Image (spheres, helix red, strand yellow):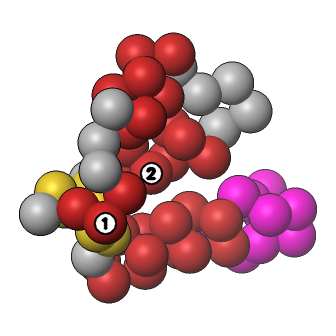
Amino acid sequence: MILLDTNIVSAVMSATPPDRVIRWLNGQETTALYVSTITIAEIGYGDTISRPGSISNLP
């Protein structure tokens, strides 16, 4: 079992994911990769606050 941290998931979701991360992930057994509910919440929160009009983006 490999629990992926938020920084790895975020890197993969970026417009240009780092080759090193992609190579590492491609070398793993997909059935061994897991994401925690904390990571899902952090990614969702980051997506929400980065949207135009978000309260955190107001001047």
Residue range of the region highlighted in magenta in the rendering: 49-59
Q: Is the Cβ of the residue at disc 2 closer than 8 Å to that at disc 1?
A: no
Q: Is residue 8 left or right of residue 11?
A: left
Please, what secondary structure does the residue beneath circle 1 have?
helix
Is residue 52 among the parts visible in the rendering?
yes
Give how far apart the Cα atoms at labels 2 and 1 are: 16 Å
Instruction: Residue at 29% x, 42% y: name it.
Output: 28
Residue that mark 2 sits on:
9
Q: According to the image, label 1 marks what residue? A: 31
Residue pictured at 65% horizontal, 65% vertical: 47
Q: Height in image: 29 above or below 49?
A: above
Provide residue 2's location: percent of width, then percent of height.
16, 57
Looking at the rendered image, the quarter that the C terminus falls into is bottom right
Say which mark, if any, is on residue 56: none
Q: Position of residue 23 (x, y in %)?
A: 42, 23
Q: Residue at x 71, y 58 (%)?
A: 50
Left or right of 54, for residue 32: left
**Residue at left offset 87%, top offset 70%:** 53
Q: Is any part of residue 56 visible from this angle?
A: no
| The stretch drawn in magenta includes residue 53 | yes
